[in-house]
Amino acid sequence: MSPIYYPKAAIPFPSELPVADLEVIDFELIKKGDENEIDRMWNAFTGLSFFYLKNSRVDPQPLIDLAETTFPEKFEEKMRFPQGDTRYTFGYKGGFYDGAQIMNVGHDAVDSFLKNQGGRVSVEASDKTLPSVLHFMNAGREVSLVLLGVIEKKLELPEGTLVDLHTGKNGSGARITMTPPLKAPATEQEIHSAEHYDFGTFAILFDNVGGLQFQAPGDSTWQWMKPIAGYASINSGDYLRSLTGGAITSLAHRVLPPPGEQSALTRFSPVYFCRPNWGVKPKPVVGISMA
């Protein structure tokens, strides 16, 4: 695996910065049905709705490889696959003040393309690139469905109530963001990703450097989320809040430039977005009332 990303960043996260005290959940134990670990994850979901996940077997390396091979290409070449203006549109986007480049890849689009069923993919259709990116997304979907199954049980819903809303055609997919090192010290106003809420079900994120911050419910203070090599960061989106009737919340978060000496590093942010099937309304599922 790339030394840029694993086993840890070349420059550690600043030790003097206060970081959020988040739960570390073991996905292997969740899959085995360990009740103690399931309870811990449920408390994490219904508390901050941000937590770390280890042993997920979701390898972000294919997205990092995609960034390192695609983003150095000429702008005209990358704009063969432009990202549109709608939130579900996949493709390339650049031109940010900080030099960041983004590629969004649709899960269903890549899957259909590789099965010779047609469809437009937002990356160069190469045998080398697409299968590995699809492997990342398949692993992300597997984790997503396991977590949704746990949430169903905790809400005492019939089996499949939430899972089945995410197994059809939908807007799930991967995104890789690559941001070069800063050329000058950054200010808090130079925010790469302003305060926002994720609109999907949840995100499975891997960061190599710091910058991600969130606000706890009822607290206007921004808390740092320290990246841990090999761990995924899970955060819930607005759809999950709606589907669960508010039992699980979604938090405001943003991305600042990497803190301290980490600002000299290239940021890689691979993420899998779990989203519901097309046509699913953002409202509580049957059997749940909005809190």
Image (tube, rainbow, N blue to C red):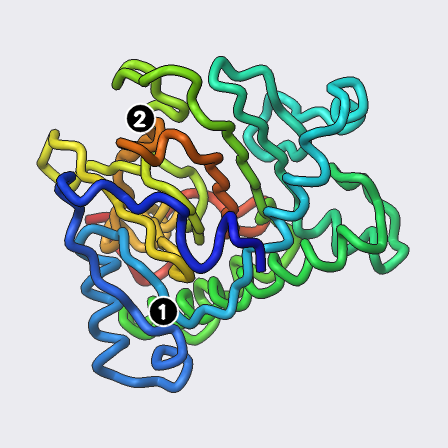
In the drawing, what numbered circle is on residue 152? Answer: 1
In the drawing, what numbered circle is on residue 78? Answer: none
Q: Nearer the viewer, residue 68 or 145?
A: 68
Rendering quarter of residue 44:
bottom left
Q: Nearer the viewer, residue 18 or 110?
A: 18
**Height in image: 66 above or below 75?**
below
Q: Earlier in the sequence, mark 2 or mark 1?
A: 1
| Mark 1, secondary structure of its residue | helix
Are circles 2 and 1 on residues that touch, CB within 8 Å? no
Q: CA distance from mark 2 to mark 1?
A: 30 Å
Residue type of the residue flagged with mark 2: Glu
**Height in image: 267 above or below 193?**
below
- The residue carrying mark 2 is 195
Which residue occupies 36% across, 30% down? Answer: 263
Which residue occupies 57% across, 41% down? Answer: 175
Measuring from the top left, give residue 110's x and y in whole percent: 75, 50
Measuring from the top left, give residue 284's x and y in whole percent: 35, 51
Measuring from the top left, give residue 197's x and y in whole percent: 34, 34
**Quadrant placement of the N terminus:** bottom right
Residue 6 lies left or right of residue 114; in this view the side is left
**Height in image: 172 above or below 192?**
below
Q: Nearer the viewer, residue 289 or 235?
A: 235
Rendering quarter of residue 112:
bottom right
**Height in image: 162 above or below 62?**
below
Which residue occupies 22% across, 41% down? Answer: 14
Which residue occupies 39% across, 26% down? Answer: 193
| Mark 2, secondary structure of its residue | strand
Q: Residues within 10 Å of mark 2 (few under 14, many from 20)?
A: some
